Image (cartoon, helix red, strand yellow):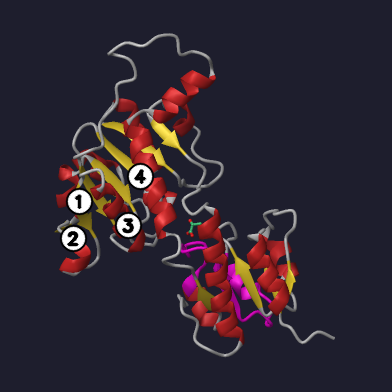
C-alpha cells in the first residue's frame, strides 16, 4: 500500500503542478474540472490529508465542521480566502494557506486593462466591429477618456495594489491610496496616503479596488461613497465583487454619475447581476486576473510548497488560519 498522503484537488490545475502532486502524493484529481457541490466535496475528502482548493469552493463553517477528521489542511490555489470561514477553520484546528505575491503582476495587468478598456470604450468598440456595425469614422466617433496623467485612487495598497500603482505610473498617473496602514516612503514612491477613504474619493478620477473581501470591506463601495467620487469617474475592480454594492454601482453607471466601470470580479459569479451586461459603459471580464500560464504555475507551486510544509510538520509560508 502507498505511504503517500491522499490529497483532494478540487479543480483542474496546470499540468506541471498536477505532475508534482502525482510524484509526491496520492492525489484525487478533477479531470472534468467540475464544480463539486458541498456534499460531493465532503464525500471525496474522506481519507484525505488535505484539500488543494480554489475560491470556487465554499468552506462555510457547516462544511468545515463536517470535513472528515483526516483532513488537516486546505491549501488554497488563490490569494483570496473569503471563500473559507477562517474562524471556523481555526476552531477546528484546520490549517489554511493562500498564494500571495505570485499573482500580483498578472492581476495588475488586468487592472490596467480594465482602466484602459473602460476609459477607451474597448468593449463597446469590439462589439461594434464584431457585429459588422462599424460603418464610418468621424472625430466624434467613440470618444473616450484618456488614462494618461489622471489621478488614480487605490483602495488596498498591498502587493497587487502596489504593482498596479507602479504600472499606472507608466501612464503618468498620480497615485493616491487608502490602506489600513501607511506604507514606508520607499514603497509609497510618492503616492499620497489617505487614512480616511471618504477624503480620498473626491480626488479620484480613477478608482481601483485591491482590498480583500472581509466583514469590514463588504459593500464598501456603496451609493454614498460613489457619490463622493468626481462626476465622470471610472471604477475598476480586480479584487472581489463583494466589495461593491452592485445596485449602487449600476445606478451610478445608468445615471452617468460614473463614466464607466471595468470589472473582473462580481458578486455571485458567474451569475452576475444581469444589468451589468446591458450597460454600454461597462468593460467586463470573467475573473481572469491571475489567468496567465506563468502565474497559474506559480500559484500551484506555491500551494504545493505550503502543502509539503504542512504534511511534513513544518510551518507553511502562507498560513492564514
Ligand atoms: C485569487 O487568487 O484570489 C484569484 O481571485 C483567483 O482565485
Task: Tell which circle, 3 or 1, labels the residue nearer the N-terminal end.
Answer: 3
Q: Position of residue 15 (x, y in %)?
A: 67, 61
Q: Residue at x 53, y 65 (%)?
A: 299
| N-term mark: 4 or 2 | 4
Asked which secondary structure carries label 3, the reply is helix
Marks 4 and 1: CB-CB under 8 Å? no
> Residue under circle 1?
175
At horizontal 31% and vertical 32% (from top left) the residue drawn is 119
* 76 up-or-down from 163: above or below: below
What residue would you read off at disc 2?
A: 189
Label 3 to label 4: alpha-carbon separation: 10 Å
Q: CA distance from mark 2 to mark 3?
A: 12 Å
Circle 3 residue: 163
**Does label 4 or label 1 sit earlier along the sequence?**
4
Classify residue 182 as left or right of residue 247: left
Q: Where's residue 283, x and y in %?
A: 42, 34
Residue 173 quadrant:
top left
> What segment is highlighted magenta in the picture?
59-86
Give how far apart the Cα atoms at labels 2 and 1 are.
9 Å
Sequence order check, earlier mark of 2 and 3: 3
Q: Which residue is mark 4?
A: 112
Secondary structure at numbered mark 2: loop
- Say left or right for 71 vs 207: right
Amino acid at each position: 500500500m502507498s505511504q503517500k498522503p491522499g490529497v483532494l484537488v478540487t479543480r483542474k490545475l496546470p499540468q506541471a503542478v498536477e505532475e508534482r502532486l502525482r510524484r509526491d502524493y496520492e492525489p484525487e484529481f478533477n479531470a472534468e474540472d467540475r464544480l463539486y457541490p458541498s456534499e460531493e466535496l465532503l464525500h471525496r475528502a474522506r481519507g484525505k490529508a488535505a484539500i488543494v482548493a480554489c475560491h470556487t469552493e465554499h468552506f462555510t463553517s457547516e462544511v468545515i465542521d463536517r470535513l472528515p477528521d483526516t483532513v488537516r489542511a486546505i491549501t488554497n490555489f488563490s490569494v483570496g480566502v473569503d471563500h473559507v470561514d477562517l474562524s471556523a477553520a481555526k476552531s477546528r484546528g484546520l490549517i489554511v494557506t493562500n498564494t500571495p505575491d505570485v499573482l500580483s503582476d498578472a492581476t495588475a495587468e488586468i487592472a490596467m486593462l480594465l482602466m484602459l478598456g473602460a476609459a477607451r470604450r474597448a468593449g463597446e468598440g469590439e462589439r461594434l466591429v464584431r457585429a459588422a456595425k462599424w460603418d464610418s469614422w468621424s472625430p466624434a466617433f467613440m470618444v473616450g477618456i484618456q488614462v494618461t496623467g489622471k489621478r488614480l485612487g487605490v483602495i488596498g495598497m498591498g502587493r497587487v495594489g502596489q504593482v498596479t500603482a507602479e504600472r499606472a505610473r507608466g501612464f503618468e498617473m498620480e497615485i493616491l491610496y487608502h490602506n489600513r496602514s501607511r506604507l514606508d516612503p520607499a514603497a509609497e514612491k510618492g503616492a499620497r496616503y489617505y487614512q480616511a477613504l471618504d477624503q480620498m474619493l473626491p480626488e479620484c478620477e480613477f478608482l481601483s479596488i485591491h482590498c480583500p473581501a472581509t466583514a469590514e470591506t463588504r459593500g464598501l463601495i456603496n451609493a454614498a461613497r460613489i457619490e463622493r467620487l468626481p462626476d465622470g469617474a471610472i471604477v475598476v475592480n480586480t479584487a472581489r465583487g463583494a466589495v461593491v454594492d452592485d445596485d449602487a454601482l449600476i445606478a451610478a453607471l445608468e445615471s452617468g454619475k460614473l463614466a464607466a466601470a471595468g470589472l473582473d470580479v462580481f458578486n455571485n459569479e458567474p451569475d452576475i447581476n444581469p444589468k451589468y451586461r446591458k450597460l454600454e459603459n461597462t468593460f467586463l471580464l470573467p475573473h481572469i486576473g491571475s489567468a496567465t500560464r506563468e502565474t497559474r504555475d506559480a500559484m500551484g507551486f506555491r500551494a504545493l510548497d505550503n502543502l509539503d510544509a504542512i504534511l511534513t510538520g513544518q510551518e507553511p509560508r502562507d498560513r492564514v488560519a
